[in-house]
Image: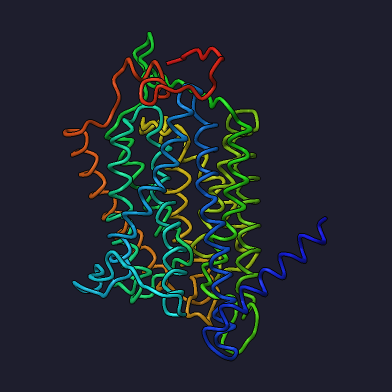
Amino acid sequence: MRKKVLVFSVLFLCLGITLFAQEGTGPEALGFSIDLVWMFLGAILVFIFQAGFALVETGLTRAKNATNITMKNLMDFCFGAIVYWAIGWGLMWGKNALGGFVGTDQFFPAPMGLDIESAGFYKSWFFQVVFAATAATIVSGAMAERTQFKSYLIYTCFISAFIYPIQGHWIWGGGWLGELGFHDFAGSTVVHSVGGWAALMGAIILGPRLGKYVKGADGKILVKAFPGHNIPFACLGVFILWFGWFGFNAASTGTAITNSGTIFSGNLIARVAVTTCLAPSAGALAAMFTSWLWFKKPDCSMTMNGVLAGLVAITAPCAVVSPGAAIVIGFIAGILVVLSVEFIDKILKVDDPVGAVSVHLTNGIFGTIAVGIWANAPEEGVLGLLHGGGFTQLGVQLLGVLSVGAWVAVVSLVLFFVIKKTAGLRVSAKEEIMGLDISEHKSEAYTGFQIFSNM
């Protein structure tokens, strides 16, 4: 059976290459077809992120909100794809304006025909829209269990249409940060810190869940834990995200074959796959041991977030660091995520049910800075501090972190404040206690079971 599946897969790939090659002649058309298939497969892997996020967020929150979490992860892609096609693509990839600040054309793009030029657009758009959706869906985890569904749809559209594309233009779309040499191979800053900054601002404006922070008899604020209702769900989600991340990082090469016909030129795809394997593995180890020391037991949710932290941190430097450096970066990320979760929860008193800010913002920043420290790719013109590059690359990376952070934090803060004052951002106390599945959707994720509320 396996042999038949393999044979049919090879035949299907060959048929696709042959059909596309008919649009041109010679090695160039064949190379384009191989690149197209590679990017298409990579985009599909990134699309699977939505399932991973849905499982992680559902598993780490309470049963009475499972339908609501699922709906939000479904609809942020559906709405996001349309607004990114209509507006976001043009702002991110359109012609430079205002000194590389924003794109100004290619809105509502609609190339016709099946020629290579149109296929090139479709390939690029499909690969980019799944990245835009990833940035938007990060926010839902930090604002889970108390956000109005209609308000969620408003801000997720705004993120996909404006916040994400404009800073993406700065770095990937030919804008000013890219011109300065800022390096973010697959999106530690462009995708993950953007989602993390928006998540932090949203959680601050929204406020904590009822009963999360309560005053004790001695007047001190007690932090109450709300354990996730389905850890196996969350773990499966982590594995799905890790699986999809090989497309997220490796397919960001943009090509699978060079003009000379050398497959995997410079072993770039292979290098990215190896670093994307090692960093999250080290992140899980570090998070497990750190939580073991901190809480006296190896914490499963912290360990899973250690995997995700390692993935986020390696996303920017995955193509320019060695396997050994990837392990170091992942290990540091695993420690950082535990410390960050504790700091945000216990010190800042910001309620982030799934640790989204710690995973995506803290380690998005760290991964971006890691390029300026460990990068060793002279052929790409990217050298970090430890490999003779001095502080030049590190300085550019820090500038990118600060400028993107300022853009997303300020605009998100204004966005959430406006939504709060107009449409309303938070559900009522009664609805929150009841659970958003019933109050927002009149639907139970686990019908027939008695769900007891612990606030």
Image quarter where the N terminus lies is bottom right
- Tell me residue 88's x, y (percent): 30, 60
- Tell me residue 46's x, y (percent): 52, 56
Left or right: where does residue 58 sit relative to residue 296?
Answer: left
- Identify which residue is drawn at 54% across, 68% down: 39
Hey, which quadrant is residue 3 in on the image?
bottom right
**Relative vertical location of residue 430 with respect to residue 271 in this rendering, above or below:** above
**Relative vertical location of residue 228 with respect to residue 36 in this rendering, above or below:** above
Image quarter where the C terminus lies is top left
108 or 287, nearer to the observer:
108
- Identify which residue is drawn at 56% across, 52% down: 310
Left or right: where does residue 403 sit relative to residue 321?
Answer: left
Hey, which quadrant is residue 301 in on the image?
top right
- The colour scheme used to paint the residues is rainbow
- Tell me residue 55's x, y (percent): 55, 37
70 or 224, nearer to the observer:
70
174 or 295, nearer to the observer:
174
- Identify which residue is drawn at 51% across, 32% down: 58
**Relative vertical location of residue 326 with respect to residue 179 in this rendering, above or below:** above
Number of on-image labels: 0
- Identify which residue is drawn at 40% across, 42% down: 75
- Tell me residue 333's x, y (percent): 54, 50
Left or right: where does residue 12 sit relative to residue 302?
Answer: right
Hey, which quadrant is residue 122 in on the image?
bottom left
